Image (cartoon, coloured by chain):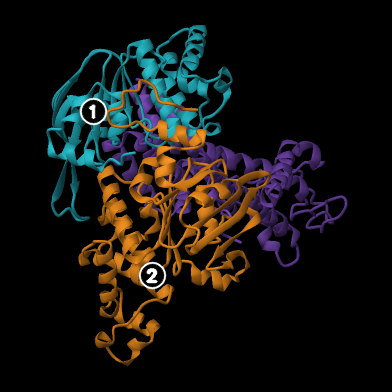
Amino acid sequence: MINVSGLKKYYYKSRTFLGGGTDVVKAVDGVSFSVAKGETFGLVGESGSGKSTIAKLLTGIVKPDSGDINIGGDLDIVFQDPYSSLNPCMNVKNIIGESLYIRKVKKDEIEKRIKDILSLVRLEHSVLKKYPHQFSGGERQRIAIARAIVRFPAIVILDEPVSSLDVSIQAGILNLLKDLQDKMGLTYLFISHDLRVVEFMSDHIGVMKDGRLVEIAGSAEIYEDPKHEYTKHLLSSIPRL
Amino acid sequence: MIRGWWEGVTRRMAEEIDVEIKHLTVQTGTKTVINDVSFSLYKGEVLALVGESGSGKTMTALSVLDLLPPELERVRGEIFFNGRNIFDMGREEIRKIRGKEISMVFQEPFTALNPVMNIGTQLSETLIAHGCFKPTPSKVHGPWSIVPAFAKASEGRHGPIMSDQLKHLLSTVKLLDNVLTAYPHELSGGMRQRVMIAMALSCGPSVLILDEPTTALDVSIQKEILDLIKNIQKERALSVLFITHDLSIVNLIADRVCVMRQGKLIEIGMKEKVLNAPEHEYTKMLLGCIPRLGDTRERLPCF
Amino acid sequence: MNFRILFGSIIIASMALAAIFAPSIAGQDPLKTDLSGGECLKAPSLKHLMGTDNLGRDVFSRMAYGTRVSLSVGFIAVFISLILGVVFGAVSGYFGGWVDNIIMRTVEIVYCFPTLFLIMIIITFMGPSMINVMIVIGLTSWPGLARLVRAEFLSLRERDFVLAAKVQGVSNLRIIFRHVLPNALGPVFVSATLSVGTAILSESSLSFLGLGVQIPTPSWGNILSSGRNYMDYAWWLTLFPGMAILLTVLSFNLIGESLREYFDPRLVGRGN
């Protein structure tokens, strides 16, 4: 469903005000992986490892320097911060329905789809007339998920979708994402810095460090038999209960 | 009822209390933010205050320093520090306690540091502001330097008088001396949080309040910072109130745990007890909803 | 209710009413001269509420009609500058690159000249008239707005909801007007309100210098101008237009400042 090979994206920034040389930031430095249909591929790494750049490259917002991206279907995205990912000037109905509206879907068809999606993400129909600031973080994230799945994409990129939520809300969103995947046969690219969450969600996991994928393995192998030193280090840092 | 229960099972009865909160109730308008909360922080222990956003954990901690935002009103309750009610103290008296005897570290180190001042200057300003800077006699230059204010003026931004004290501070948080001349944006998140801890420790407080100090950090950095805090706490026998929403961190750092929800104290007890055999449904849910490595559950419990 | 908003709104509302109903409240023809001896330069009385001028015209009627000129110049000029400023600022901030470069360099060039001086030069070429004054003030005052809109767009275009819209295939035009602009309108609105005051002041200055609305059509500026020769013994000829200009500009500024505080809560309480 997703096939990525040799992906590279470098950023250049001048070191001083007067341009005395430039620094190269290798955000993504030769990354290859593939994700099968209906599967969840987890990308885990610390801040600055390049995992969010991969999300942006896949969506096409950012163009890669080199490498190939093959995507077998429509794609949508859910961002980390539900306070910045919903337009404060639009009501929920317009937020969720926009991608259908611009594709000239009929009005009553849009209404019906939005209502179906709302019950899928377990929100009341009464939310439609409300604006984002009237919701809690968890509810906003449900709205963001509804927006992402309303036109039945094949792939959903989840860029740290639960990192800014409380643990109990986080659990609800993770359950919801699993339910949606079962019902709609979605393919997920799940990005997070929290190995526990990634491991809970994913079939395969890629560990990222400094723009490179240092290890790709099945979800269970990663913690039972980590191969790379960095993976071991990450595992040992996780607080255990 | 809860009090009676935990006082019976903990071995802390005879030990000294550092901070004691009694029936604290705080409201904003008609909404109760903290609802009749009572607990004690014993000398030399780490007490984790756990709860989700809106549980009142941060407000409880701010009450200890009498730093509640103006829209919140304390309706009832006392907080005793060294046997004295802090709400009876005068403004000057409480100001002397803040930062000197009880100090606090916040979640976001970047906003707490001034971006246009280097770390050395900020550390020394903290020292001077609290009046705990100690001039080293051998390094005093000229007669003026004995007076702190003149010393500051004549020594410039990070003069030699204070640098020994500053270097010592940095070494307690395992930072190198060159951090003194660095600016906040040049440091990583973990280093900034170390600087904040150094600032909090600068006057040798006996109580340290840490408000989600590692939430904004990567897991591997989080572990380093938690280890550092634990070491310093043991070395100096500090009493630490550690605020977090993550029960799994509790295991690494705390002696006792206090769980709060919607302004109420739900459960308090020794770490082993609360984590392994929680009494309250809410605590069980909080523990259950964190995914664990090798989790075979298909669904997580949630409300 | 904020006192400043209340004060500003009352003044502007009464000015607007005066402008709309000028013919009925004026009572007398503002252009009718009366040189029959005793009617020139008469002090305010019940018959002439604001006195008469050197040609025996009723100053109150002239002021009422002048309100029409001042307010319409203010609003239309700002409307023109708003459209130019928003379009150029939005394009510049949203697309960046060479488009941004060209627009911003143009803005800087316009900024190099003192605005009133620039307006005067253009007016001397185009010829003084009310329409020309509106157009020229509009054409010279958009760069400030464009910069403001650009800055708002620069920060908003990186927000996640804009990225989400891009991912969903929403067109650039729709993103600009539906997603970014509504979120940028607060500060733009504030700035526009403040510009109305400035535009009215510019019109008055031009008319005072004889480059604006032409005699005998009344405007606050030219009433003030014609009154300055008689300032020693006919104070009403300068006081009333001066007060009108002052109060109107002040009201727009008060409303603008209050709106700014409303949209930017950080500023609240700083003045007290």
Number of marks in picture: 2
Neighbour class for label 1 at 10 Å: few (<14), some, many (≥20)?
some
Amino acid carrying label 2: it is: Gly
Residue A237 is situated, as x and y percent measured from the top left of the image, at 25, 43
- Looking at the image, residue C47 lies above or below residue A143: below
The residue lying at 47 percent from left, 10 percent from top is: A113
> Which tint was used for chain C?
purple
Which chain does the residue under circle 1 lie in?
Answer: A
Residue designated by label 1 = A57
- Looking at the image, residue A226 lies above or below residue A23: above
Residue designated by label 2 = B204
Q: Residue furthest bottom?
A: B143
User: Looking at the image, is mark 2 or mark 1 nearer the viewer?
Assistant: 2
Choose between B79 and C271: the one closer to the eye. Answer: B79
Choose between B171 and A27: the one closer to the eye. Answer: B171
Residue C211 is situated, as x and y percent measured from the top left of the image, at 54, 49
Disc ID at residue B82: none
Q: Is residue A168 left or right of residue A38?
A: right
- Looking at the image, residue B224 lies above or below residue B88: above
Within the image, what quadrant is residue B176 found in?
bottom left
Which chain does the residue under circle 2 lie in?
Answer: B
Give the cyan chain's letter.
Answer: A
Q: Secondary structure at mark 1?
A: helix
Choose between B272 and C34: the one closer to the eye. Answer: B272
Q: Is residue A70 visible?
A: no
Give the orange chain's letter.
Answer: B
